[in-house]
Amino acid sequence: MMKKNRTVNLTKKKDGYGINFNAMASPCEVLIQTPDKCLAELVGQYVSHEVWRIEDKYSRYDTQSVCSQINTSSGRNIAIDEETFLLLNFADQCYQLSDGLFDISSGVLRKVWTFDGVSSEYQHFPNQDDINKVLELVGWHKVIFDKQSISLPSQMQLDFGGIGKEYAVDRSILLAKQHTKRPVLVNLGGDLAVTGPRDNEQPWQVAIEPPDCSGVEHKQDMIVAIKQGALATSGDARRYLINAGIRYGHVLNAKTGWPILHAPRSITTVAPQCIQAGILATLGLLQGQQAEAFLTEQEITYWARR
Amino acid sequence: MNNLNKDIKKEVAQKVSKKINLKAALSLATGALFGTSVTTGAVGQTIEADEWQFDTAFLLYSEVDRVTAGEAIVAGTKTFSNDEVLNLKFTFDTLTGPSANGAIAQPKAQTFTRASGIGRYRTPEGETPLDDTFHDTRVQLNGQWTQPVSDNVTGSVGGHLSKEYDYLSLGLNGNLAYDFNRKNSTFSMGISYFSDTFTPEGGIPKPLSSMLVGDSNSPEWDDEFAKTRISASENKSTSDLLIGFTQVINRRMITAFNYSYSMVDGYLTDPFKVVSVLNAEGLAQDYIYENRPDSRVKQSTFMQAKYHFDDSLLNMVADVSYRYMWDDWGINSHTIDSRFIIPVGRASYIEPHIRFYQQSAADFFTPFVIEDQLPVDFVSADYRIGEMSAVTIGAKYGVALNGGNELSFRLEYYHQRPTNGGFEEPEALNGLDTTPVIDAIIAQVSYSF
Amino acid sequence: MKVNKTKVKTRMNVTLLSVCVVSLSACSSLGVEPWERDLLAKKEMALTSSPIDAALDDHIYFSKEASSGGKSFGGGGCGCN
């Protein structure tokens, strides 16, 4: 398990401050347009603590987390609070809307699929039997929950990774708005949102990293101007497998157990909230070849790179 | 099965089965997650509360050979945190140039007394008599307060004050609107009351009396002139009722239907207008001051539709409306108004506009009176309550500037065509233009910030 | 003659109004969900998208024609000649 580095760094920027910290295995950043250093520190503290709180609660790597409690429940009822209930609710709706493709119980499939984009080589390409065995442990419809508790068949696992970071972004924005009217941008590893435009109705300029950022060839970042709402990027920039010349992204089809084929390398979407943007980007990827058509048809603003 | 918020679940399931808007369903789900009301509107649109939004405009109206008017408006709107809105508006306008006095053209020159009673003016032969003494400056203040009264009811009250050299108008209005059907339908009802006082220079003329034409410098003039006046000022009051219904048809279309009933009482005559009294051949013998009834009841029905087209039709918004008006003076009118807002590029738009107007004459309208038709009780030769049709054609160009400001320019051409509503013209008027056309240019620049 | 014309018109309009009222029940099937208001929320789709232009135009037509109002209060307002 990673040692947690929980420090918050404050840097002065041209017309404001930036607060940096690490969470959810990503570099996190809060930008605030204010000359007030104390305010920047305050907002930085609130946001970083809220992000760490969510990480502690829903990270599957943390043995103390609610997520781990659920995943080691062996079929027993586990008590949950309102926040967890609401998140499970949301996951359920995403399951419905995606016709079962988005399923937070599909995390177990990582047992058979190991992706390591660093070497970008075939590591352990599973066979159908392996997949079928694990598929038995996948299935949101097998999860039973209500406002007080949750239970799922033994060995089934929930993974909040698909929504955790985006949820943390939205919660951070809500917190920031409670404490200041100054423009704030919260960026957790590429999933970001703003409280509103910068002064004088100016947009925030954000750079979206191209998928192939292996350091060898620095491709041009794409710059997006955002005044309102959120941006989320879903993709296989760093995690994929290549087998027989075919690239398998890490987004898995929860029904078949296989990665989605012919999906764009990355999709960035825009939505009023980060969690929405994230789901839309993921749902887009889950359409594989049809990703762009699907997103266009739904009238979603997006950028896809193949 | 999971115990969830049943309503949300049902709605989401409906969305899935109908394969409608995924964005929409997710919005609902996100709203439930954060306990906030659903975000509406596209990302990138915000209405900033606690800030004033200003709209300013300057307009120039200029008729060929006739009146020219300039009008400037400065309006401010502030939205408060509970959806309360305050709107304040200041209007300034000024008018100058000749306008028709109601008399008809003649094959000889004509002389008239100015409305003030001081001085005369001469109209060359064959021309429509125009009085050019009008220079008027007006200042107007409006205030309107709108706020939610309950969950689905919005109320609004407002006041109006307008002052010219010779005219004062005070008004109040109130309105209640009720939203239902998930705010897709709105029913509203409003009333207004205006009280106007008119104190024209030269006083109010005795209706149907002859215009005194002579040397206003002579010693007897003042007395003689005073004999033709009945008072220094007059009042009129206007009460309006407006009933409206608006309905959202679908994502691209909204419609509105209004009915209005208006009662005006008091002095409705135009004290500056006369009617030519002609002999059998058509030569003017006298000019009498017009006289209109002291009450007028107007009703109108109005309907409007707005439709937002998609890419195949330039993403334009079409706005078409029709109004039918009728009153107890015998006037009825049709107005068809249409405009199309066409986006150009990312930050500007062009808005072509065309309006058709047609009205019938008031019962007591006549372009002239033949002497043996006298006496009459109500009469007016004011072409503005006569039979006419008019067309307005123009376009507006607007561009959004940095910081959410907008600059726009509007240019229109207004063409008014009075028509002879079946009045047989006597010989002397043959070859004269008795229904002169009015052409005007309207130019406006607006800036919102 | 004048009086009869008004009566006919009033009767026609009472009918129009009652037709509208009856149609209100049909209206419950028309409309959009709150999240489908993206286009309707645009300024161009407001019934009066430019109130300043409308006020200026109303003033012109009130002064030059015999009709006024319909969309909003006709009112008194000025001694426009």
Image (tube, helix red, strand yellow):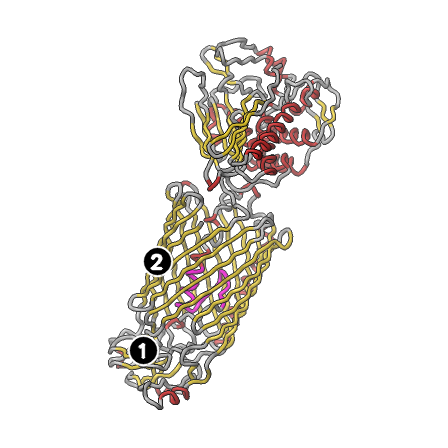
Which sits earlier in the primary sequence, circle 2 or circle 1? 1
Residue C57 included in the magenta stretch of the image: yes
Asked if marks 2 and 1 fall on the same chain, the answer is: yes
Distance Cα–Cα, label 2 vs label 1 = 30 Å
Residue B30 percent across, percent down from the top left: 60, 35
In the picture, which quadrant includes the C terminus of chain C?
bottom left
Which amino acid type is shown beneath numbered disc 1? Ile
Left or right: where does residue B71 sit relative to residue A108? left
Does B311 appear above or below B209? Answer: above
Does A197 appear above or below A145? Answer: below
Estimate how packed mark 2 is, as few (under 14), some (14 to 19) or many (20 or more) residues with alpha carbons within 10 Å.
some
Q: Which mark is residue B104?
A: 1
Q: Is residue B19 visible?
A: no
SS for dot 2: strand
Q: Is residue B161 visible?
A: yes
Q: Chain of mark 1?
A: B
Tell me which corner region of the image, top left, top right, bottom left or bottom right, holds residue A94: top right
Left or right: where does residue B217 sit relative to residue A29? left
Residue C25 percent across, percent down from the top left: 60, 53
Which amino acid type is shown beneath numbered disc 2? Ala
Front position in the image: A64 or A256: A64
SS for dot 1: loop
Estimate how packed mark 1 is, as few (under 14), some (14 to 19) or many (20 or more) residues with alpha carbons within 10 Å.
many
Q: Chain of mark 2?
A: B
Q: Which mark is residue B274?
A: none
Q: Nearer the viewer, mark 2 or mark 1?
A: 2
Going 58% across and 35% down the picture, which residue do you hit?
A176
Q: Which residue is mark 2?
A: B443
Left or right: where does residue B15 sit relative to residue B363? right
Residue B173 percent across, percent down from the top left: 55, 64
Going 63% across and 13% down the picture, which residue do you hit?
A133
The boundaries of the magenta stretch are C55-75
